[in-house]
Amino acid sequence: MRFETKQLPVNQDYAAPDGSEIRLLLEVSRGGVCHCTLASGRTSRAVAHRTVDEVWYFLQGRGQVWRSLGDHEREVDVCPGTCLTVPVGTHFQVRNTGSEPLFFIIATMPPWPGPAEAVAVEAHWAVS
């Protein structure tokens, strides 16, 4: 067991498969956390995850998240304080409807395995 501490990186570590900016935080054997940014006026690409579940917590900005799994589909407004789940296999897309960046924390269980985890799916909204 080791203890880790990390500050939020100034620069993104990589672009997520959906097009958002990812800044890696920390992970343990059963999960990880990152900070995600979607710029004002942007809409992510629609994707689904092969093996991970996620919990998202919104810190700044305003937007919408679309999720679809089987016959269950939902579009929700998000703002600071909103928390939502993205179960494995869910088709999802995010759009920033505000004038500032959309910032949110993502907890991934198990830890993010890499870019092959996300697969493109049919878009709900046009990508911008």
Image (cartoon, rainbow, N blue to C red):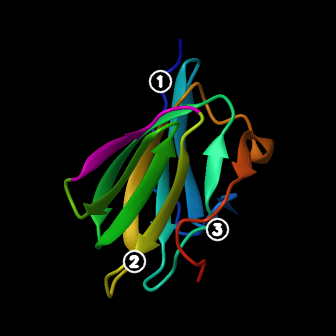
Q: Is residue 20 visible?
A: yes
The kind of residue on which mark 3 rests is Gly
Check disc 2: other Cα within 10 Å, few if <14, some if 14-19, many if 20+. some
Q: Secondary structure at mark 3?
A: loop
Residue picked out by circle 2:
101
Lower sequence index among marks 3 and 2: 3
User: Does residue 56 appear to the left or right of 109 in the view shown?
Assistant: left
Q: Which residue shows up at 59% across the image and 18% down it?
A: 29
Front label number (3 vs 1): 3
Q: CA distance from mark 3 to mark 2?
A: 14 Å
Q: CA distance from mark 1 to mark 2?
A: 31 Å
Q: Residue 118: image x %, image y %? A: 70, 46
**Considering only vertical position in the picture, is 86 above or below 93?**
above
Q: Which residue shows up at 57% across the image and 69% down it?
A: 44
Residue picked out by circle 3:
19
Is 87 in the magenta? Answer: yes
Magenta residues?
82-88
**Considering only vertical position in the picture, is 34 above or below 87?**
below
Q: Residue furthest front?
A: 71
Q: Are marks 1 and 2 in contact (CB under 8 Å)?
A: no
Q: Which residue shows up at 39% across the image and 77% down it?
A: 101
Residue picked out by circle 1:
3
Check disc 1: other Cα within 10 Å, few if <14, some if 14-19, many if 20+. few
The kind of residue on which mark 2 rests is Pro
Is 65 in the magenta? Answer: no
Lower sequence index among marks 3 and 1: 1
Q: Quadrant of residue 106?
A: top left
Q: Residue 31: image x %, image y %? A: 53, 26
Lower sequence index among marks 1 and 2: 1
Q: Secondary structure at mark 1?
A: loop
User: Does residue 64 appear to the left or right of 13 in the view shown?
Assistant: left
The kind of residue on which mark 1 rests is Phe
